[in-house]
Image (tube, coloured by chain):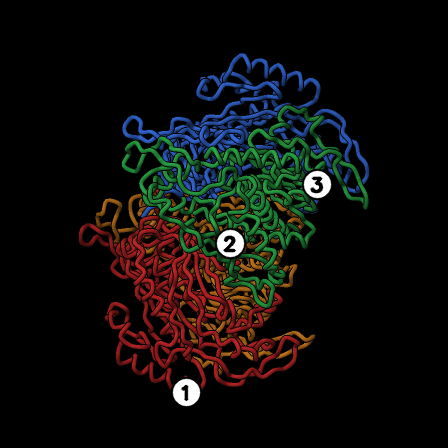
Chain colours: A green, B blue, C orange, D red
Amino acid sequence: MGSTYGKIFKIATFGESHGAGIGVIVEGCPAGVPFDTDFIQAELTRRKPGQSRITTQRKEADEFEVLSGVFDGVTTGTPIAMLIRNEDQRSKDYSHIAAQFRPSHADYTYQAKYGVRDYRGGGRSSARETAARVAAGALAKLILANEGVKIQAYVSQVGKLKLEASYKELDLNETENNAVRCPDPELAQKMFDYIDGIRKQGDSVGGVVSCVAEGVPAGWGEPVFDKLHAELGKAMLSINAVKGFEYGSGFDGVSMLGSEHNDAFFVGDENVVHTRTNHSGGIQGGISNGEDIYFKVAFKPVATIMQDQESVDQHGDVAIVQGKGRHDPCVVPRAVPIVEAMAALVLVDFYLRNRTSKA
Amino acid sequence: MGSTYGKIFKIATFGESHGAGIGVIVEGCPAGVPFDTDFIQAELTRRKPGQSRITTQRKEADEFEVLSGVFDGVTTGTPIAMLIRNEDQRSKDYSHIAAQFRPSHADYTYQAKYGVRDYRGGGRSSARETAARVAAGALAKLILANEGVKIQAYVSQVGKLKLEASYKELDLNETENNAVRCPDPELAQKMFDYIDGIRKQGDSVGGVVSCVAEGVPAGWGEPVFDKLHAELGKAMLSINAVKGFEYGSGFDGVSMLGSEHNDAFFVGDENVVHTRTNHSGGIQGGISNGEDIYFKVAFKPVATIMQDQESVDQHGDVAIVQGKGRHDPCVVPRAVPIVEAMAALVLVDFYLRNRTSKA
Amino acid sequence: MGSTYGKIFKIATFGESHGAGIGVIVEGCPAGVPFDTDFIQAELTRRKPGQSRITTQRKEADEFEVLSGVFDGVTTGTPIAMLIRNEDQRSKDYSHIAAQFRPSHADYTYQAKYGVRDYRGGGRSSARETAARVAAGALAKLILANEGVKIQAYVSQVGKLKLEASYKELDLNETENNAVRCPDPELAQKMFDYIDGIRKQGDSVGGVVSCVAEGVPAGWGEPVFDKLHAELGKAMLSINAVKGFEYGSGFDGVSMLGSEHNDAFFVGDENVVHTRTNHSGGIQGGISNGEDIYFKVAFKPVATIMQDQESVDQHGDVAIVQGKGRHDPCVVPRAVPIVEAMAALVLVDFYLRNRTSKA
Amino acid sequence: MGSTYGKIFKIATFGESHGAGIGVIVEGCPAGVPFDTDFIQAELTRRKPGQSRITTQRKEADEFEVLSGVFDGVTTGTPIAMLIRNEDQRSKDYSHIAAQFRPSHADYTYQAKYGVRDYRGGGRSSARETAARVAAGALAKLILANEGVKIQAYVSQVGKLKLEASYKELDLNETENNAVRCPDPELAQKMFDYIDGIRKQGDSVGGVVSCVAEGVPAGWGEPVFDKLHAELGKAMLSINAVKGFEYGSGFDGVSMLGSEHNDAFFVGDENVVHTRTNHSGGIQGGISNGEDIYFKVAFKPVATIMQDQESVDQHGDVAIVQGKGRHDPCVVPRAVPIVEAMAALVLVDFYLRNRTSKA
C-alpha cells in the first residue's frame, strides 16, 4: 500500500531503481485533454539525472512511452499508463549493501517491514520513483494551465545560503537559467560553488524549495481532513528526503498577534474580493480564497555520501558501509520539478473534486 | 468530501459548532478491544472549553454517548458511533456575521465553495469538530497502549516564548500540571501570563506543539505516498490553525551535512538495532525504525479577536466585522490532546495496515 | 470494514438491532439541495415494521433526527448525520441465543470472524440496519428527481406466485395500494393470503423484487470494474437475504442468439438516439444508454422461523434453537423501498462521478 | 474511474484492444510470495484467443513481462506491474465503425460519456482488458492456494444446453479436457457442435459459467455493504457480457420455505462445525462459514456478429453496421479462467482484510 495518490485524478506508480523501469497509471483524467507529449518529456528532462556536475552522474534519457488512454492526441477518459525504462543500472555497484543497512536510508526499515528487499540502488525507496510523479504531474499541469493556474517552484536555500526575498520580489523566469534553479543569479552561483565543494568532499547538504501557485480560484480544497494545505503537506512530505512543510506565514506566524496576522478583505478590480495581506498563503479553512498559494519544503542532506560509515548488517553484526555509487550532493535543484508536479497533482484533484460541491 | 480519515481504522466525523452535536463513526476497529469509557471521557475533558481563564468561556461538558459497536464492554468489530451533544450554543452571538466574512476565517471560502454556509460559530469549520477526533483518537490510544506505544504532546512555544530543551531533557509528566500544558513549570507560568495579557487586549497569539511517540516498532508506515511522516504531516495540518509541520531534524536539518545528519546504526541491548543519533525522527523511507518519533506543529494566532476589523460582506460591500463571541486567545494548550489524538489515529492505521505486509 | 458505500456520495451506516439506534452519515452530498424532511420520513415509514399482519410486529416509529449538514432547509455540503433511535428492543427475547447459532443467520460467521458478537436480534447483521440506507437513499432520490430520474420497485414474485407481465404493461402507481406492494391487485391478494398462511405455519418464504429506473441520461456508469450494473448488483446483493441479481435479459438472455439479443439503434423524437428493443436493460459496456434501466433481485425465505431447529452452540455442543422473537414471514413487501434506496444511492454516485468525465 | 478493484490487494488495469498493450499494477500483495511465472503464464494461455475454432481467430501470444515488485523470485511488497503487449492489431478492420455505433456494444455509451472514444476493437471496453485481470488473479490464486483455497469454474450452460448435475456430482478435472470447458464430456461435445454451427451462421449465443471455491475458512467477508457475495457479484458483473449472478440457492431459493432452506448446523469431524445442507452457498450474513462457496454467472450472446445490423452514426444518421472483424461466437469457454481470476481477487482481498478483524 501507499503507491497511489488522489481521489478523482488518481495516480498509481510502480518501479524500482534498478528494475525494468518506472511508470505510472493515471486514472480519472477527464477525456478530451490535448496530450502534449513534448511538454511531458520536457518536464521529465528537468528532473533527469546528469544535468550538471552537481547532480548524480547516472545516465538516463528518461524517455517515456504512452501505453494507453490517449487516442488521436487527446485523453480518452480511460487509464493513461506511462512507462520509463531504466537504462543505466549498474546493479553491481550495490552488491556490497545486499546485506548491509546504509545509515539514514530505507534499507533497514524495508527489511523490517517486508522481510525481503530489492537492495539495488534502494529499490522502491529510490528517488528514481519520482520520475513517474513528474510525468503524471506534467499532465496535471496541462489541465491546470487551461484553468489559468500556474505553478512555479525554485530553490530558496542551500545549506545556510538563504534567499531572503519573497516570491513577489523575484523574477521566477530566472529559475531555469542556472543549474541550481535559484531565481537570484548571484546567489545561485554561490550555491553552485558550495554544492560543488560539498560534492568534492564526498558529502551532501540540504536545502529548501519554495513554491507558488497563482490563479487558483476560490473554492478548491475540502473541509476537515482533506484541507488543501494538508494535502499539499502530505504530498510534499512524501517526496524523498523531505523533513518539513510550511505554508503562508508558517512557523514564523507563531509569534505574530492575531491583529497583525489576520488578512483583511477588500473589494478589488472587477469586484473581486481580495485580502490586503496574505499570511493565509491563499488558503482559509483548508479552501483556496483566490490569493496566491505559497509554501516551503525542507530537504535534508541526502543519505548517500562517499565516506565510510558505521552500521550493522542483516545478521546484526557491525559493518562499515563504504561510500560507493552515484549520488546528488544536494537534491534541491532536481527537486524543483518534483515539487511542482506534486503541487499540480494536489490541485488538479481538488479542481475535479470541486465539480461536485454544489447541486 | 474531506471528513473521513484512515484506510483501515477509518473515522468519519460530522457536526457543526451550533448544530445538534458533534460526532464520529469509527469503522475498522478490531473486535475485542476493551472500551474504556472513562479514559475516552477524560481525553475529551482535556480538550473541552472553559478549562481556565486563558481558554474560551463557552460551557460544554462534552459528555459522549456510544450509539453502536460496543457490547459487554468490548468493541464488536462493527462501526462505533459516538455522539457529543452541543449545549451552550449562543447562536445569536453570530447573527452579525450572517452576511459578513470574518478575516482569516473560513466564512468566505465556504461561501465560495458551497454557495451556502452555516455561519453560526463557523459551522463545520469550527475547531469544535476536533472533539470528535479526540474521542476516536482516545480509542486509538487504547489499542496502541496495548502495543507498547505511548504518545505525549506538549506546548513548546507561545509567541516568542520558546522551550529550547528537547523532549529527552524534559519531564513530560509535568505537562498536565499547568493550564498551558508546557512541561517546564517556570516557562509555563510566563506563557500563562503572556496569554492572559493577550486575552485582555482582545487579541490572540500563536504557538508550537511538540509531540513524541515512544515504543513504535520498526515497520510501521508505507512507501512512496503514504509515508508515516507524510500522514502525520497531513493529520497535523488538518487541525484548525496549523501552518507548519516538521519531524526529526526538520527545517534545521537543511543546513547540516550528510556526514553529520546520518544516523549510524549499532546493535544495542537484547540485540536490537538502534541509531546513535536520531535526526531521522524515528522514520526512514517513510517507515518507522524503532526509535522515538518526534515532530513539531506550528499554530497561527486564532482569527477570532475582540477588535473591529475591515472586511466585506456577501454583497461585495465594505463591512466592519465587530469583535464578538467567545474565543481562545491561544489555541495550543487545548491543541495538545488534539495533536496526540491525530498522532494516535495515524499510528493505529499503520499498525493495522502493517498486518498485511508479509505473506 | 464494509459499512460504507459510494465514492462521491458516500454513506457510512452504524447501529445494531437492539443498541441505542441506527444511523448514517452522508458525505459528499452537494450543497444547496432542499432537504425534504417529510419525504425522507415517508420513505422510512414505507420500510418500518408493523405495517400489516404479514410483517414483523416489532413496533418502531422510525422517526429520524438530523444531527448535522442541513441549515435553513438546505444541505450545506458538509456531512449529514441522521439518527433513528431504537424503541421496541425486547432484548430478553434473545437471551436464549446468546450461546447458540441460529441456522442460516449470521451468528456463527460473526462469531468466527470477530470472536465476539452482539447477539441481540442479530446485532449488526439485522435488517434493521437498512433503515439507515433508506434515509440516505431518500436524500439521493431527491437529487435524482431533480435530474428527471424516477426509481420504482415492486414485488414481482412470492414463492411460486409470479407476475409474468413486464413493467411496461403494469401500472406501477398501484404498487403502494396493497400490503404486498405488487402492482397487480389480484395477484397481490393471492400473495397476501399465501404469506399469511406461511406466517400461521411459523414458516417463511422468499420472493423477487423488480425495479425500473426511468430518465437516466446516457453516460452514467464507469468502465471495467465499476460498471453501472456491477454496482447495482453489489448494492442489491448487500441487502439482507438477497441471493441473486439480473438486469435486462438476465439469465434468460443466455439462450438467445446475438442477432435476436442485440438492440438496434434508431433516431427517435427530438433527434434522441434510442434502441428498438432493450435487452441491454439500459446499460451497455457498464454505462447507461438513456433507455430504462431494469433489474430483478431474488430474496430467500427469511431465516427466522417459529419452529425448533437443529444447531450447535458456541461450545460445539448440539443445540435446539427455539422459534422465538418477531419476524417477517416474507421480506419482499418491506424490501421494495430498500431496493429503491440502494438503486438511488448507486445512481446518484454515478451522476456525481460523471461530472468529472470530460475536460 | 472504475479501473481499480480491491481494498488491500488492489489492482489497477490499463490498456485498449488495439493500443500498445494491456497491463495491471497489483498493489498490496504481501511480501515474500514466491512468484510463479509459469503458472501465471499458463493462466493467461487459458484465456488467450485462438485456442480452437470456436474462439476468436485473433493471434496473441499473451506473453507477459514483469516490470516491478519482484526480486529474487519473490514479491517484495511493492507494486507489481505486469505488461502484455498487443501484437495482432488489425486496426484497419475497425475504420468502418469510427463514426458508427455497433448495436449492444459500448460505442454509443462511451461517446456519450467522454465525447471521444478509441473505436479500434472497442478500445477500453474490449474483453481484451480481462487478460490483465487473469494475470493479477493468477497471483491471487498462488496466495490462496497456500491457504488451502481452490477455485474451479466450468461451463454449465450454452444456449439451451444445460448441465443439470451439481458440482458435487461432477469431476471438475475434466473441465480443461475439452474446448468448451464443460466437465461433462458428452455434453461438451454437443455444446461444441452447437457453437460451431452458430459460428458458421455468423451469429453468437450466450451461456452460464458455474464456479466453486473450496477451502475458504469461516470468517472471510465483511458486514453490510461489502458482503462476500456482494463483492463476488460485483466482480462477476464487471466481466464483459455478464447479465446475472446468483449464489447458493439463488433465484430458485425464492420459492422455498424457510424450514426447507435453512442449513442446520452440526459438529463434524475434528470438531469442525458444518451445515447439513448448503443453500447458503457457503456465505451467511456476507461472511464465509467454511462450507463450499458456489455461484453462477450468466453471459449474454456476444454483440459482435457477422451480419449487417440497423444502427445510427455519430451524426445521428441511419447507418448499417457491417459484420466484420473477429469474434467469439460464445464467450463462456474463455470466460472460465476470467471467472476464476475475479473470484480469486475477491477472496484474496477478504483474506487480507480479515487479518485486521480481531484485536
Q: Residues within 10 Å of mark 1 (few under 14, many from 20)?
A: few
Residue at which label 1 appears? D200
Q: Nearer the viewer, mark 2 or mark 1?
A: 2
Residue at the spot 41% in from the left edge and 84% down from the top edge = D199
Q: Is residue C247 left or right of residue D109?
A: left
> Helix, strand or loop at disc 2?
loop
Picture quadrant where residue C351 is located: bottom right
Q: Nearer the viewer, residue C192 or B313?
A: B313
> Helix, strand or loop at disc 3?
loop
Residue B332: percent from left, percent from top: 57, 25
What number is the disc on residue A171?
3
Q: Nearer the viewer, residue A6 or C101?
A: A6
- Which residue occupies the extreme top position in the image? B186
Q: Nearer the viewer, mark 3 or mark 1?
A: 3
- The answer to whether residue C184 is seen in the rendering is no
The answer to whether the residue labelled 3 contacts the one labelled 1, judged by CB atoms less than 8 Å apart, is no
A113 in relation to D10, above or below: above
Residue at which label 2 appears? A62
- The answer to whether residue D185 is seen in the rendering is yes
